Image (cartoon, grey):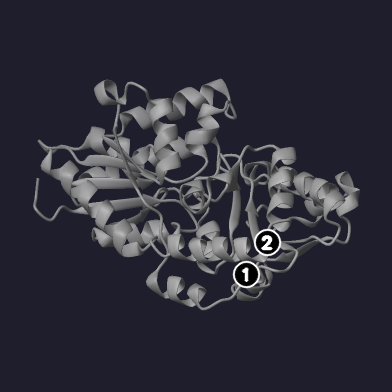
Amino acid sequence: MAADPKVAFVHGRPGPHPFHAALARSVHSDFQYVDTILRWHDRNRPRPYRYLSMALCGAGLAFTKSYDVVISEGCHAVPIIARSLSFRRKRPIVIALMANETLFFLQNGVYSNATFRRLVRTLKSYDALICIGAFQLELAQKLLPDHRAFGPALFSVHSSLSDERLDSLANLEPSTDSQNLLFIGNGPSGWRAWYKGMDMLIEAFEIALAALPSLELTIVGEWDVAFRRSLLEKYPLVQGKVKFVGPTSDLSPHLSAASLYVHIARGEAFGISIVEAMRAGVPALVSEFTGAKEAVSRVDSRSVVKADPGEVATAIIEYFNSTKDYRNSLSKRSREIAGSYTFERSADEFTKVISSLCRSR
């Protein structure tokens, strides 16, 4: 394998996650949509059309630039097809970058039986899975228990923020003596709402309100009006206490007004907004099914709770009943821990994995 391998990065539309794109650039990847030929990823196309597109795109990868490594953002079939069609003696190494809901949904019966079998078969066809965070790695190990003998090699790298983002957030001061909770996440509804744990968040908030009537919850992100209405109708006691402020490019006012960040997800791959809140000095409370629990637990293990509204409410009440000194200590520790999530560390881990896989050939 070449000392400086030629790498392709296959991603969906409208484009890759900025962090994943930065990782791909760290190994000098060429970027390619998963549907460069016969576009379908952001359009409603029949299954035969999609399968034909995958075959053609896989053939294009196999025959155009003779890539040494093909990295897929998620579980796509195109890199597998490219490897199978390659005419080279050493076929390309195919890698899936795992940082979405797929592994959690596979393990928890969310997909149909047919989809489950197809996705697991595709995952097992990869040479390696690079998981973003310890939670994704844990899920992959449970889903593929025989991976050492019959499946892909499993690796993990840390998620991160840019140096500029870490610096700007460090200049914010939270309102640890306020009664304000914050959640940042996009729907707009349906499975995304279930994945983000919106129902559990609102139910837990309603329970906590009974003990602490001054609490307020701000939700930043894109959520359908109809979904918001139905959610608030289901939990009428939170009326007037929950503010949906929509998406924003500037989180600073909301972070500065918050005392506690709450993220009670069902399988959130990581949740970089949690680390952002921590870097701004806002302590976080997360579910056991939220990837950024690896950072939160380093601040206080009690801040990682079961995905249960009652337990979440109890943790919220305990936090707001704690002393100001205790909240400030959590704030300081949160900021310190979040500061370790640098892109330099992530890129170093990522390039080392790619290099080790290339050397193994």
Give the amino acid at mark 2: Thr
Give the amino acid at mark 1: Leu
Residue 129 is labelled as none
Return the residue at label 2.
323
Query: Residue at the location (49% across, 62% down)?
Result: 333
Of residues 223 and 177, the one nearer the viewer is 177
Return the residue at label 1.
255
- Total marks in image: 2
Q: Is residue 273 above or below residue 268?
A: below
Sequence-first disc among 2 and 1? 1
Q: Is residue 277 visible?
A: no
Residue 25 pos. (x, y %)? 29, 62
Q: Label 1: few (<14), some or many (≥20) within 10 Å?
A: many
Specify the quadrant of the image occupied by residue 327: bottom right
State left or right for residue 149 relative to residue 216: left
Residue 167 pos. (x, y %)? 44, 75
Question: In the picture, which quadrant includes the N terminus?
Answer: top left
Q: Is residue 310 above or below residue 8?
A: above
State left or right for residue 79 relative to residue 174: left
